[in-house]
Amino acid sequence: MIAWQHLLKNIWRYELKVIDENTTLVTESWDGRKVSFKWWVSDAGTWVPKVMAKTLVNLKQICQAQ
């Protein structure tokens, strides 16, 4: 599992589960209960898909480089 806490106090988590030698299941979750600015969470549906996709691309590049 990879997890980190954002400046605004929300926690992002990525759980990685190996399916086979070429496939890994990535489950992203985040906990916004302690977010400092609730408006940031209320419009998450508009921007989270884009940043989630970018994060998955970066994660894939990191994992494949090793």
Image (spheres, helix red, strand yellow):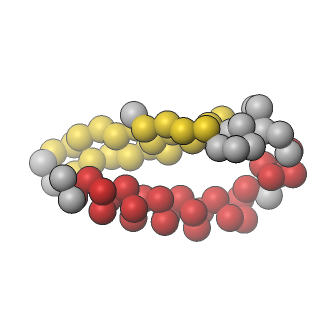
Which quarter of the picture shows residue 30?
Answer: top right
Left or right: 14, with 19 as reference point: right
Is residue 36 shown to the viewer in this render?
A: yes
Is residue 41 placed above or below 9 in the rendered structure?
Answer: below
Is residue 32 shown to the viewer in this render?
A: no
**How many numbered marks appear?**
0
Residue 57: give x, y in percent of width and height: 39, 64
Left or right: 4, with 37 as reference point: left
Q: Quadrant of the N terminus?
A: top left
**Residue at 68% over, 64% down:** 47
Left or right: 32, with 40 as reference point: left
Residue 35: give x, y in percent of width and height: 78, 38
Left or right: 8, with 27 as reference point: right
Residue 28: give x, y in percent of width and height: 50, 45
Comparing 9 with 43, the one in front is 9
Which quarter of the picture shows residue 8?
Answer: top right
**Residue at 80% over, 52% down:** 40
Is residue 35 placed above or below 63 in the rendered structure?
Answer: above
Residue 22: give x, y in percent of width and height: 16, 54
**Residue at 86% over, 45% down:** 38
Residue lying farthest left? 21
Which quarter of the picture shows residue 2?
Answer: top left
Residue lying farthest front? 7
